Image (cartoon, rainbow, N blue to C red):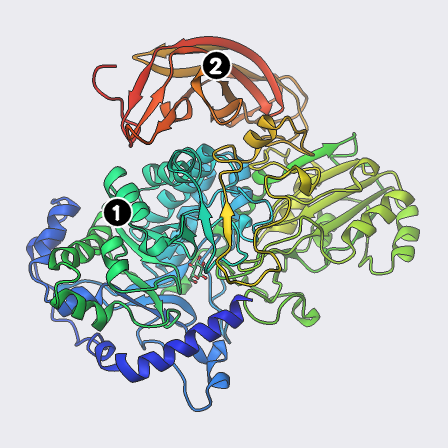
Amino acid sequence: MTFVKRSLIATVALGAMLVSAAPALAQFGPPPPPPPPKETPWTNTALDAHTRADLLLKEMTQTEKLALLMGHFGTNAEWMNLRGDIPGLGWKMPAEARPQSAGFVFGVPRLGIPNQWQADAGIGVASQAGPAPRLRTALPSGLATAATWDRQMAFAGGAMIGREARLSGFNVLLAGSVNLAREPRNGRNFEYGGEDPLLAGVMVGEQIRGIQSNQIISTLKHFAFNDQETHRNSASANISDKAGRESDLLAFQYALEVGKPGAVMCAYNRVNGVYACENDYLLNTVLKKDWGFSGFVMSDWGATHSTIPAANAGLDQQSGYPFDKAPYFAGALADAVNSGQVPEARLDDMARRVLWALFSTGAFDKAVEVKEAEIDFAAHGKVSQADAEAGMVLLKNEGVLPLAASARKIVVLGGYADRGVLSGGGSSQVYGHGGNPVADLNLGPKFFPGPVTYYPDAPVAALKRLTRAEVIYDDGKDLKAAAELARSADVVIVFGTQWTAEAIDAALKLDQNGDALIEAAASANPNTIVVLQTGGPVLMPWLSKTRAVLEAWYPGTQGGTAIARVLTGAVSPSGRLPLTFPVSLDQLPRPVLDGLGQPDKPVTQINYEIEGAAVGYKWFDRQNLKPLFAFGHGLTYSRFAYKGLKADVRDGTLSVSLTVANTGKRAAADVPQIYVAAPQAAGWEAPKRLAGWDKVALKPGQSRTVTVPVDPRTLATYDPAGRLWRIRAGTYTVAVGSAADALGPKVEVTLPEATFDVKGQRLAGN
Ligand code: BGC
């Protein structure tokens, strides 16, 4: 497990630090007290970030530049059991780091360059394990936010996290996770944005934009192809340039364009044999040259493996020392620069990139401070609740939801629904107010990425508040007793959970006796509803016996209330699946996860060329497979109709419009999804692609016309030789659907041949 690995890595690192690196590190801190602030050329906010970075860089000594490039773990290593590993040796975090935080980088007070205080922040301001984690608002999982298909919701969530981070003293957030759900068993899918590059990239980009609206930096991570956790520190994800650019890299590219993050975190794994954090192709060519990224690349914690190769390949900042074997940057980087193995100009480039990020986001100009008393937790709880409600996906409903007001006895079974709602584990863990209501049960691993953590907004209490029924809870451990109780109820609600976490891949299966409990309840009472709290897809052997299934993901701090409001119809479910739910593992490109149960050596080779860019629904389409629930699927309590579908090509750009009408009896939101199918000759990886969508909230009888612009890259293929995107001339079919397997009206449109540069900008002459 990673905790063990983390300890080992750090143990080795400690030795290295003590023998060789201590003097080099000592020169970076603690810094002298800052002089009084004064007007300087680079504090002129009228200048652009590039100019300001250049002006400031000129004033910096080599040591000061190096300081900006060396990250330290922000948590006293005692909490990682290191003292236990090596009696008498402890590793202390820099005194200036925020307690129990992920990272810290010294600034240069003399020049007004702030320290970089780093926190994980995928769903909220996270804390590393320890005695006094900061208690903050947790959004639902990243996948839940992606399931809202609501850009404003993603932005609002990011803005909320950023506000709490600023008032917690953090100015660099390790957020913006957009690894594609190529592998449904990936234990971190809950942190990501699903399987489609456009949906994931846009939604995660919006979250980043929201975070950075607080004048702080967000990362975009983990670059790239960190699509499984099994052997994540060593495995090689192997994929061609073409397939990569049309899938995972495209998700990063969209997120970069929408979010404009100040930093990108490179991943643990190798890509085509080379570690992501010393991968010249990924960092220098794709990210910096092709996409024009001006910010800095920081390593994941323990993902730096060298000084010279890493620096020359495009890594700008080593993170979280002592997770790495050695402080590769700091003194070793100084030596490499002084001996000419890393050009002086490259050192300048590295420091300039950090400065650019601080200037372009405003983090340089507006200092962060710890002001916890100013955090409006009530308002932020509402942001989380709205996100959770909008992201829940009603997978199945045979007329039992919303719960009938006439139900007199509701039996709730399992999932600790009397205590709270589940969250995903690992570095993104946010600690909520009210503590962990399942702490006494010691669920899951004791240390990282555990323990299993719940937020104390219990669905049972919320159901009691929102219904007039008698609500009885049973933990479901005794299947016979649970079935007996189920038989006596008007309605049974079984809570199925799947705890997933960083560092561990998941079986697509409910925890404990979840499947058996659902079977038992459904056999005893046909009115059985299942509420799932899962990291991603699970298999559902019991599906046909149940009347309804609601996927609630990990619903965040207000999750119990959100679940109850959706079940009772206070709000109509409007989430749509951001990834495919398979019927069985043999439908996947890799029925057996690469490296699972195998030793770390030789290096695990993961062949992503099997599906190439045909990730998720594209694979299912290509292979003609019928999933359990398709990408884009999700029911509501109302009905919608699509009319007047039109596809217009203006100045060579496709845009699609249609009218959406709520023809049902309840206010609800719909997600019209635009799918495009290409002619055979276009050479797409799969029969169709998502080309855009909108989310439309409508009252009964109301309708609205929406226009969806189509990004040319969703119509093109990437040409690695020409280094460009090309749309092939031909007749394309544009359809509006309510899911990838439920297409409605279609129109045909003829597109001319067109080419676009690596950034997706139309090339002259077409
Ligand atoms: C994770 C990153 C995280 C970092 C710092 C790593 O284990 O992969 O996502 O930002 O730790 O906590």
- Image coordinates of residue 100 in percent, x first then y, are 43, 71
Q: On the rendered structure, is 527 left or right of 158?
A: right
Task: State the image quarter where residue 48 is shown.
Answer: top left
Q: Give the amino acid at mark 1.
A: Asn
Q: Nearer the viewer, residue 582 or 728?
A: 728
Quadrant in which the C terminus appears: top left
Q: Is residue 691 positioned above or below 269 on the image?
A: above
Q: On the rendered structure, is 711 left or right of 112?
A: right
**Other residues around mark 2 within 10 Å, as few (<14) / some (14–19) / many (≥20):** some
Q: Nearer the viewer, residue 621 or 665?
A: 621
Label 2, secondary structure: give it: loop
- Disc assigned to residue 284: 1
- Disc assigned to residue 679: 2
- Image coordinates of residue 681 in percent, x first then y, are 45, 15
Q: Nearer the viewer, residue 198 or 472?
A: 198
- Image coordinates of residue 764 in percent, x first then y, are 21, 19
